[in-house]
Image (tube, rainbow, N blue to C red):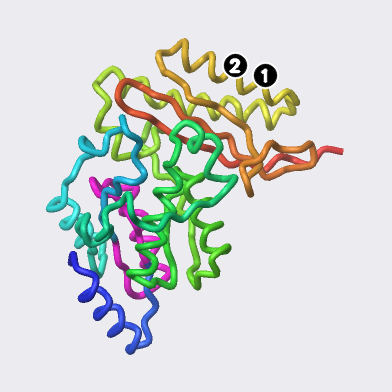
Amino acid sequence: MSAIDPLRQQVAQWRQQGERIALVPTMGNLHAGHLALVEQARQLAPKVIASLFVNPTQFGPHEDFSAYPRTLAADQAKLATAGCDLLFAPSLTSVYPQGAEHTTRVEVPGLSDILCGACRPGHFAGVAQVVCKLFNMVQPDIAVFGEKDRQQLLVIQRMVADLNMPITVVGSPTVREADGLAMSSRNAYLDTEQRRLAPQLYHTLCTVKAKLISGEPDYPAMEHTAVQQLAAMGFRPDYVRIVRAQDYADPTPSDTALVIVAAAWLGRARLIDNIAITMPLRG
């Protein structure tokens, strides 16, 4: 389905039947991580809608919007097997009838300007804009997003809270390959040698986690060491940071819910990953 009116008619019919609806927004080129989102959505609501839209407003001028893989037929087959009830794949003009540059913007201050937001200016404004539009088109009860993009998840949760949207936003655990690499559509950009090296991003974060658990107190030193190690292996790190889980701010000594976050380039692929950690209480 690509048009908004038939989508809303179907949603209205389900509502009349008393059904709850879960939405899984995607940009397509689906993998097992996306299908895990659909599976979780099915556990939360009897009707599941997946959206597929490659959103131009979240790509920077020199990023991969034109090259981003578009695999609609394969995605449709995977979603049917996963038990998705409806695929909503709107056209660019359906989402931005006045053109993307003339469409109302939605921005989440603070969370949108740090880490990936600092490395990709305007990215999270584009994310918030399109997700807000999708929420208004679909009007779901629940929306499921992957925790691999945890900063994105926080941005959307903040937007929903700030705008009083009656939607529950749920995070779904990162799905990994057997060697630890977080599944991502952009992993297809990796050549054979880069794919062999890519899991070291996750393993580097695991090393930082072990140091935190052991009680090492110097967070900046750990971050700096991790960046140096990744660079020495052939990555081009954007950052490795230890942040407070609820708002990605710098942690205080009393904060126990932390996230180790990282972004690094490997060839054409910008890889992101994170590990959540609950610090032990120390007397």
Q: Residue at x 56, y 37 (%)?
A: 114
**The N terminus, quarter of image:** bottom left
Q: Nearer the viewer, residue 278 or 50?
A: 50
Residues shaded magenta: 23-50
- Return the residue found at the far top: 232
In the rendered view, tell whether residue 13 sits above or below residue 70.
below
Graded by Cα atoms within 10 Å as few (under 14), some (14 to 19) or many (20 or more), the crowding at tag 2 reads: some
Residue 47 colored in magenta in the image: yes
Q: Residue at x 38, y 69 (%)?
A: 136
Mark pair 2, 1: CA separation: 6 Å
Question: Are circles 2 and 1 on residues that touch, CB within 8 Å?
Answer: yes
The image shows residue 191 at horizontal and vertical percentages of: 24, 22
The amino acid sitting under disc 2 is: Thr
**Seen in the image, is 221 located left or right of residue 240?**
right
Graded by Cα atoms within 10 Å as few (under 14), some (14 to 19) or many (20 or more), the crowding at tag 1 reads: few
Q: Secondary structure at mark 2?
A: helix
The amino acid sitting under disc 1 is: Ala
The image shows residue 190 at horizontal and vertical percentages of: 27, 26
Q: Quadrant of residue 243?
A: top right
Residue named by callout 2 = 225
Q: Secondary structure at mark 1?
A: helix
Residue named by callout 1 = 221
- Return the residue found at the far right: 283
Q: Quadrant of residue 25?
A: bottom left
